[in-house]
Structures are given as structure tokens and as C-alpha cells.
Amino acid sequence: MVSSRSKCSAGAFGPEALLARLGRDLPQPQHYWVAYSGGLDSTVLLHALAEIRDCLAAPLSAVHVDHGLQPGSADWSGHCEIQCRRLDVPLRVLEVDATPGRGDSPEAAARAARYTALGAAIGPGAMLLTAHHLDDQVETHLLQLLRGAGVDGLAAMPLLRAWARGWQVRPLLAWPRATLRTWADARRLEWIEDPSNAQLAADRNYLRHAVLPVIYRRWPAAADNIARSAGLCSEAAQALSEQSLQDLRRALAPDGRRLQISVLCALGEAAARRVLRSWLRDAGAPPMPRRRLYQAISQLCRARADAMPCIGWAGCELRRYRDEVWLLRPRQGATCPATLDWTGDELDLGPGLGKLRRRLAAGGVDPAIWEQGRVQVAFRTTGLSCRPAGRQGSRSFKKLAQELAIPPWLRGRTPLLLIDGRLAAVADRCICEPFAARAGEQGWLIDWLEEPVS
């Protein structure tokens, strides 16, 4: 008996309905690739696509990933090859090492290995079609809910996402598995049942076999309603993302590398947290735990104007200096080297310290003085002073660093250019007298590359 979960707003499943789904506001790829596991869902997707291949905007192929985790994985690959040969659909088999690392779940490790291999294999401009269906969407939404996710997680799986060098599309999301099973049985299709899907140790399997049947008996329309909630969460997440992008653009400092605290904190705490999370993600930093994120906004926005709080997590640090938030990735054990002689070629300062290059431009260090003296690179030492070019009065390095807005944690790692033992330039920030080229003449300007900050 087919439950009411088979009734779906998308209507009856079939190749024509699938073709309409693929043509509705989706990009046209250079190639369609079906992620074909050999199970029921991907078998339905492959056969339905094979029936409409002449109407597709690009060639159709299948790709099977052998994780090597099941004793019969080679038999699965053989089954997929036979089915694709019967359908005259080209098949590519990928073998991956899906062994989980320490602390990783087997499901997460297999998923990561699978998508990494698929992304490398299918080529640019291609579309990967995966057989996730309505029940998968329901499970994903509920799992995210049980994990305490916000609207981004509760949005579950999108129909379309930019992925690898093309797209991933889930064209079966509108239909429950029972509908796909009915279609497959009517055509006497052959597929493989993965025995691991019946094991209740995995959270998704437990939800599928032990929890959802109880929910569906009490609320027959739960699947459609939960999927609708996921769609509403997706709309809310998209609206918040667009607003956060606008807020982030306003909050970025002029150099684009840091955040302006006055702008960030004027947004309100909830919006500020989303902006900070987006900024960290764009910078490639690991996700900040929720509790730490709340602490970060509190410390950044409520500390005294002259305070410099430090928020650390997962090898990264957030620091506040004046009106800006800095993202740092301190290297354990990184030390500044002793004084280095510099011939003028690109100079590697060591781990976490970056590199120095020089270039001729207006201003800079007088080339004649550079060539005649002994040029060295040093780091913060006592007794150094500088009279900035074009200005009156000499300053200690500490005073000069304050004027140049060099944060205290960066001063000890800021490369200093010495000529015959005297301070000639502070990294790419300042040229000292009497080493500056004359007005209108070119000199050696220093570029400090890969500073040890975000």
C-alpha cells in the first residue's frame, strides 16, 4: 500500500516530469553526469534520463564511485557497468580511499572522498545529477534541527548549487522514495540494496527506520510539510545572506582585509554575528563555535576604546586594534631571524614572516645610497629611530609604529631596512631621512608580501 507521502506537489514522476524539472530555471551544462551508485534512487534517475537523452541540452554519462568499504564493492561496479551497457550510457568508475580519519564518521569520510573524486573527474561546465529525493530532504532537515542548526542548516539540500567547476542538481527532491519505487517496479528495474542502509547505528538510518514511520502514521502529510518548511528556511537563509553581503561590504576596511568595528557593531548583535561569520568563511578561517562567536561580538563591541581583546579558536585569533578587527593565524614556534644581508633579490624572511621585494618608483630609498651601503633586514631592536621623509623630528620605533598604525603584536615581526646599521625604512610603511630619494626621482620601494595576518 502506497502511503499519502507519495502525493507530491510535483505530480506523478516520469521522464517527462523530470525533463521539465531540468529545464526549469536551471543552467545548461556542457555535460550531464549521473552519480550512479547502483541503488534504487540513482537507478531510477539514470533510466529516466536515458529515456529523454535526446531532449537534453548536453550529452549524458554516468559515474560510479567505488569506496572500497564493502566486501562486494567490486560487484557493485560490475552491476553498474552492465546496466549502463544495456542503456548505452557511458560509465566512468572512480576508486577512492574513504577510510575515515581519527575522529571522523565513516559517512562523512565517504561523502568527502566521493565528492572530491567527482569534482576532479567530471570536468568544467558539467552538471552532476544526484538522486536525493523528498525523504532525503526530510531526514536532512530533521537532523539539522536535532543538531541545533539555524536557517542555513534547516534549509537542508538545495535543488541547485554551484559546485566544483560546474553545478550539482538534485532533480528528484520533489518526489518521495515510494513514488520512485513504484516507477521502478513497474519497469522491472534492477538495483542493489546496500546492507548498511538497514543498520540503525547511523543517525540518518535510525531516523529513517525508527522515527519517521511513527511520525508518518500520526501525520500522513508530514513529509510534504517538512519539505515546505525547509523551502521557507531556504528563502529566509537567502534573504539573510544577501543582507549580510551588503553589511559585510559596508563593514570592510578600505584595504578589504579587515573589518571596521564601528560599522560592525552598529548593525546589531545578530547581524554582526552573521557578518563576522561570513568574513571568516571568506578568509578561509575554520568555523568559530557558536558560543565563541557570541563572546567575540561582545568583546569586540563592548571593550574599552583602547582595549585590545584577543579571541582564539582552532589556530586562529581575532584581535582588535583601534577601529579594526584583525584575523591572525599565529605560527607556533615561529621566530624572527637574526639580521639578514639583502642584495635586493626577493628575500624570504622565514615561516609566518612573509617576503620582501623591491621596485623602482617615485620616492623610496635613494638607489645610490642603497648601492654604496651595506643593506640589511632586521627586526625590532632597541635604539633605532627614524625621521620620516618630508617631516620634522626623529621618532623612536615605538612612537613611529603608533603613528603608522602598526599593531603591537605585529611590531616585533615588522621587517626593518638598515643601511650601514641605520634605520632606512620600516617595511613598506615609511622611508627615513636621509635615505629617501630626492623629490621627483625614483627610488627603491619595498613590498612586504604575505604578512602574517589575514
Image (cartoon, grey):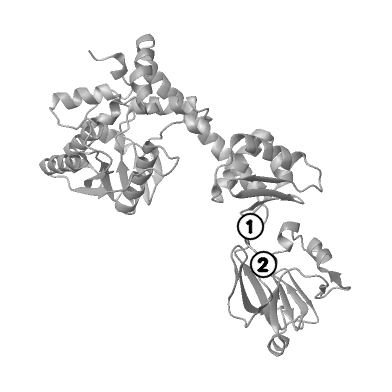
Residue at the top extreme of this rendering: 218
Q: Is residue 217 left or right of residue 58?
A: right
Measuring 45% from the left and 40% from the top, which residue is drawn there? 103
Q: Position of residue 279 (x, y in %)?
A: 59, 46
Q: Which residue is drawn at the image coordinates 42% and 21% (left, top)? A: 226
Q: Which of 347 and 135 is in front in this view?
A: 347
Q: In this view, does 354 lie above or below 254?
A: below
> In this figure, which residue is indicated by the disc labeled 1?
453
Q: In this view, does 77 lie to the left or right of 24?
A: left
Number of numbered discs overlaid on the protein picture: 2
**Percent x, y of residue 229:** 46, 23
Going by the numbered disc 2, the residue's amino acid type is Cys
- In the drawing, what numbered circle is on residue 336? 2
Mark nearer the viewer, 1 or 2: 2
Q: Classify residue 335 by image quadrant.
A: bottom right
Q: Where is residue 50 in the image (x, y as percent from the top left)?
A: 18, 39
